[in-house]
Image (tube, rainbow, N blue to C red):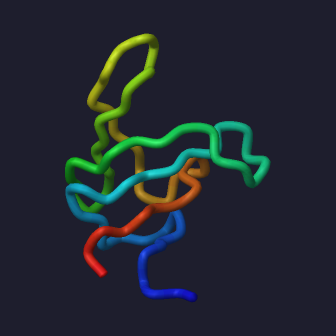
Amino acid sequence: MNIGQWGDRSYTNVVAGDTIFFDWQGDGHTDHIGLVIGTDGTNVYTVEGNSGDAVRVKSYPIGSGVIYGYGLMNY
């Protein structure tokens, strides 16, 4: 059942608290997850654990090929 809790990599209405899933190898399987802390309309900003053995704030262009999709909290 689809109740609006998923957005693909091109989804632009991400908000703080959404989860972001990554597919580093581009093989259709998720490899990593982070939390969205914001967006500026061009980039999505995240906080991720186990990123170089640390918790880090990172950013990715919206639609980046390494983004698998988003788990949306604002349904």
Q: Nearer the viewer, residue 23 or 39?
A: 23
Residue 40 sits in quarter: bottom left
Left or right of 14, for residue 25:
right
x and y, in percent, of residue 29 in the image? 72, 49
Left or right of 58, for residue 37:
left
Give the number of marks.
Answer: 0
Q: Nearer the viewer, residue 63 or 47?
A: 47
Q: Nearer the viewer, residue 17 or 1?
A: 1
Residue ranking furthest to the right: 27
x and y, in percent, of residue 12 in the image? 36, 70
Residue occupying the point 54% across, 38% down: 32
x and y, in percent, of residue 16 in the image? 20, 56
The vertical placement of 54 against 72, above or below, is above
The vertical placement of 8 against 33, above or below, is below
Residue occupying the point 79% across, 48% down: 27
Q: Nearer the viewer, residue 58 or 16?
A: 16
